[in-house]
Image: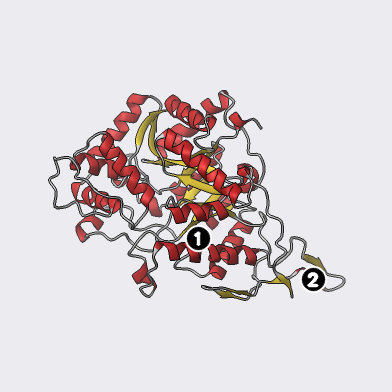
Amino acid sequence: MSSRQAILLLCYMHLGGSHISAWRDPDAPENAAMNFEAIKEAAETAERAKLHGLFLADSLALWQRSPETLARLGSNVSFEPFTLCAALSVVTERLGLILTGNTTYNEPYHLARKYASLDHLSSGRAGWNVVTSGNPAEGPNFGGIELDRERRYERAAEFVDVAQGLWDSWEDDAFVRDRESGIFHDADKLRVLDHQGPAYSVAGPLTVARPPQGHPVIAQAGTSPAGKAFAAQYAEIVINPQQDIEQARTFYREMKDAAVAAGRDRDDIKILSNIALIVGRTQAEADERMALLDSLVDPVPGLETLSGFLFHDLSVYPLDEPVPEIPVSEQGTQGIQAHMLSMIRKDNLTLRQATQLAARVGAVAFSADALADHIEEWVNTEASDGFNLVFTDLRGSLDVLAEHVVPELQRRGSFHHEYAGTTLRDNLGLRRPSHASTVQSV
């Protein structure tokens, strides 16, 4: 496959659209986040377009909001992602299912078992978006646990080590299932992890056979120094929030180099640029859709959303004056903060305009042809290996992507016509991990 045909595309499955007012769109599905039929149709559209996978974010708590704001948001409830992806695995055949698993508020055995089970149910299409928690409201739901950023990533590294060891509890050919002899599995091919570490003590073995992919694909989206160091060691998909192409090229080069320095191959890590967007068949159609969603922004949740992104209370400032100087906080996701501040400064936005920017998560309006050009430019100049597409309105933009953008990329010879294989690893061009030799036989 040539480099021009190696574009990777994920659909960020923000159910109902990423815009905080998308639920008010007359064209939006009713109760989109809890409407399985609408979600199933979106997944089927993504697979029909031959996208590599769905990317599902998750939070273990409502973001800290005022009652007035919470009452105006349509994203306060959603399906638990493992349950949802198990259901989606039945109605899709090749589409990857990459879902978030929190290492701060779970135990390694729990998540290793769930991801291994999903990988079997989907015939090898599971991916794990590793997060360490960016929502301060999560801790009180789990006994008040709070960890600083460095400690969260230290625990995450041990957590993933344990999960990968548990996935290797059984060798691939351990289960002989010989009815005549009465031997169900080869005793020499069952391994015990017996992990004893600073944060976790896990004996094993796992009660699920080795996943079809060996290990589910590991994804990571942190851009702090600790996050990037973790990604270099463990991640196979890295989500890059940089919106400036030169900064993206720098990030791309640095992450590939860091992976090599960690003893990995450059092709073991795929860099996907995160882009929030709305897509129309023409630019006028895209602009019209964006203007509609912007017009639906309620200033109460808009202002609070912006304050949440920037980890700074903006309620005391005048709405129609420029956004004041705000430093990047040590809390939250630093890459998102930096991106939002960059866009605000670039266009010298007023606070009211910035609330609309925050409401659409910094989304940009593209025509179908312009998006195809954008994707090609970034991949062909090593700013990314592809994109994680965050649709502001989901269904409208996803339909345009499937009906116009993907066929255009295929016409140009830049995107595949069929999936490369049956597993997520096959389709991303990632090698299957060999069975670890560090765990001990029973």
* Residue located at (43% from left, 62% from top): 150
The type of residue carrying mark 1 is Thr
* Residue located at (25% from left, 41% from top): 356
Q: How many C-alpha atoms fall within 10 Å of the one at disc 1: few (<14), some, or many (≥20)? A: few
If you read the primary sequence from the N terminus, does the residue marked by circle 1 or circle 2 appear first?
1
The type of residue carrying mark 2 is Asp
Residue 28 figure quarter: top left
Q: Which mark lies nearer to you, 1 or 2?
A: 2
Identify the residue position indicated by label 1 in the image: 83
- Residue 430: x and y in percent read 64, 46
Q: Which mark is residue 188?
A: 2
- Residue 269: x and y in percent read 58, 46
Q: Quadrant of the N terminus?
A: top right
* Mark 1 secondary-structure assignment: helix
- Residue 109: x and y in percent read 57, 70
* Mark 2 secondary-structure assignment: helix
- Residue 304: x and y in percent read 23, 52
- The single residue placed furthest to the right in the displayed view is 180
